[in-house]
Image (cartoon, rainbow, N blue to C red):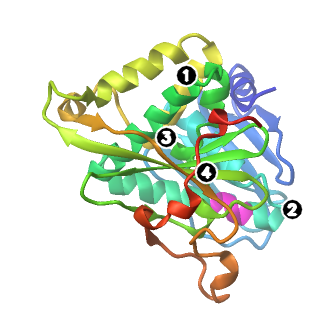
Amino acid sequence: MTPEKQFRLALAGINLKTVPLHHRVLSAYALNVHGRPALLVKVPQDFDRDIEGTRGIEVRIDPAGSANRFLRFQSESEGLTVMFEAIVDSLLDASSDAERTEDALVHLIEHFEELREMFASRGGRLKGEEIRGLYAELAMLLELRDAGLSADAAAAAWQGPYRIAKDFVLSQSRCVEVKSIRRVNHRVKIASVDQLDPRDDDLRLAVLPVEKCAPGEGRGLLDLVADVADWMDSAHSARESFAKALAALGFDAEDPFYQRYHFEQGDWKWFSVHGDFPRIRPDDLPAAVQDVTHTLDIDELSDFTSSSHWAQPH
């Protein structure tokens, strides 16, 4: 049963009804609080982390001395909203790779704090570089459509809105990190070492030239959103996943503010991230340095020029 169905089951019951959620190491539950959904996560007795809430989410922790202590992420809205679903899915995904309970709890909390900072910095609307990045990721969704992927598969593969390390995680251990560039600036920002860490995956860096132009020229951002949405409407789960992703980004397609954003789109540039690909590796960092942000000049990557996963046989 999906988390969405488990939360709906909890909300259909009496007040304070709980339904267990599946997680590899954490004890997590869907909770009904007078018609408002909440995510419960069991924490140790000595847990003392102070966590602030964010837009639409209140955070509570049971007092010390409780027989069982729980961290609660509670929606401020009645019913199951798209935004709350997206946040819960993102928190569970971000903590699912940990092997130990304490590590999973750290990952979950750190991811929530990243989401809180992201929402605070956006102030309700995406900024210029975020809009360009969204345009590139939406364009990649249409690339996946043209490559023959189903709407369900493409929507599930799109992980960028949830701050997962790679923007697209496909089947057969294939991943794509998407970046946009301008005509006069061929440098891309790498937000963390994980973005270009292939591990055991076949990782490609896909770079799309995107130049802003006047309204009425090029392709409008909202037109691109509508094209993707039309495709996603072919499957209920894809439509919901797409809506959750946009909500996680804080993007409102009904906001006329975005009508001014039109872009001229160039041809995709593909690079295979393997071997000696120039990147900062986790082992390069001193133990005290947890992460770094850096800039990559794609004009220096000619030795790693490649093509998309679907343009060559598997």
Kindly identify which residue carries mark 1: 146
Query: In the rendered image, which quarter contains the C terminus?
Result: top right
State which tag comes first along the sequence, 2 or 1: 2
In the image: residue 256, left or right of residue 308: left
Label 4 with label 3: CB-CB less than 8 Å: no
User: Which residue is pictured at 57% across the width and 37% down the height?
Assistant: 86
Query: In the rendered image, which quarter contains the N terminus?
Result: top right
Q: Secondary structure at mark 4?
A: strand
Amino acid under label 2? Glu
User: Which residue is pictured at 86% across the width and 62% down the height?
Assistant: 99
Disc marking residue 204: 4
Number of numbered discs present? 4
In the image: residue 225, left or right of residue 22: left
Circle 3: is it few (<14), some (14-19), or many (20+) Cα within 10 Å?
many
Point out the stretch of residues depicted in magenta: 105-109
Amino acid under label 4? Arg
State which tag comes first along the sequence, 3 or 1: 1
Amino acid under label 1? Asp
Kindly identify which residue carries mark 3: 248
Distance, label 4 to label 2, CA atoms, is: 27 Å
Kindly identify which residue carries mark 2: 99
Distance, label 2 to label 3, CA atoms, is: 26 Å
The image quarter containing residue 97 is bottom right
